[in-house]
Image: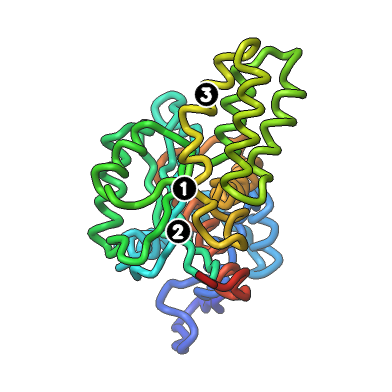
Amino acid sequence: MLVPRFRQGGLEHALFAPYQQRTDDVDKALGTLFLNGVSTHKLKSIAEQLTGRPVSAQTISTIVQKTDQELEHYRTKPIEDKYEYVFLDGIYDKIREIGLERKVLLCCLGMTKEGKKELLSFHLVDAESEAHWTEFLIDLKNRGLTGKHLKLFTTDGNPGLEATLKRLFPYKRHQRCIWHKMTNVQAKAKKRNRRALMGQCKLIFASPTRHEAIQRFKTWQRQWEIEEPAAVQCLAKDLRDCLAYYDFPKEHWKSIRTTNVLERSFREVRRRTRPMGGTFVNPASADRIYHNVFGMLNNNWKNRPAPFTHNS
């Protein structure tokens, strides 16, 4: 909607501030479209259809920058300490600022006893190191995630993250993501053996009980330890953490034994960045898009029924 202009004099009204050319709702809609993957080229024609005139790329950038205050609120607001399961993972992304750099998005998702999910925080850092994970988790604790009701952390096995969890949450259980672990096992096996070896390996985690899973692992170990010692050792050294989910309600197993819930969130980010060539212009642009995608996911999860109930 355009503001009427006059050659002489002026018109006072309640809809627009002085010199404002569009309503706030139009600006918000344009910003949301951009953050959801619509290119600035397409937005120009959309804006022209809505208001009668196109908008520049700089105008879109200015509109999007208004979301920075919302991002700061998201990163600093208190966290309700109600989560029984917490998932931690990092995703690598390309940032074009001075040259092309790879940075890591550290991300935390909490799940309640009813299965309700929420992405609690994210930070873009230079590397997935113990120091960066320490800063990230200390910030979460300071905001309220002290772990009073927390029963399990699920991670991809990053050594820096594991060391940090042992220091900051020393009495909390740890689940090693079985999808990441099986990927590691497969990478250590000879190509000719991978299909058979991994087919049997998957049966370990399909066991109805921990005891049965251990028995299947021992059978698998005896069959492959001579021909594929590296693959067998890869699983053996982390088997305890890979089977942690058996100590929790059966209806929770599928949700808590992998970091897939975060992987799906990361795929939403990839879908958004695909029109941009998979590269962010700068860290600020990356933060805005992450915040938009994660905010959309949180709203979707908030309005869905709880996927399971807590019976333990």
Q: Which residue is drawn at 60% across and 29% down?
A: 218
**Mark 1 vs mark 3: which is more N-terminal?**
1
Residue 62 visible in image? no
Report the amino acid beneath label 1: Thr
**Mark 1 vs mark 2: which is more N-terminal?**
2
Instruction: Judge from the rendering whether residue 165 lies leftward or rightward of residue 244; answer left or right.
Output: left
* Vertical arrangement, residue 102 with respect to residue 86, above or below: above
Q: Decide: few, some or many residues near mark 3? Use Cα within 10 Å; few <14, some 14-19, many ≥20.
A: some
Q: Which residue is drawn at 40% across and 50% down?
A: 122
Report the amino acid beneath label 2: Tyr
**Mark 2 vs mark 3: which is more N-terminal?**
2
Horizontal and vertical percent position of residue 283: 41, 41
Asked if the residue under mark 3 is in contact with the one under mark 1, i.e. CB atoms within 8 Å, the reply is no
Asked if the residue under mark 2 is in contact with the one under mark 1, i.e. CB atoms within 8 Å, the reply is yes
Horizontal and vertical percent position of residue 99: 43, 24
- Which residue is tagged 3? 234
- Mark 1 and mark 3: Cα distance apart in space: 18 Å
- Which residue is tagged 1? 154
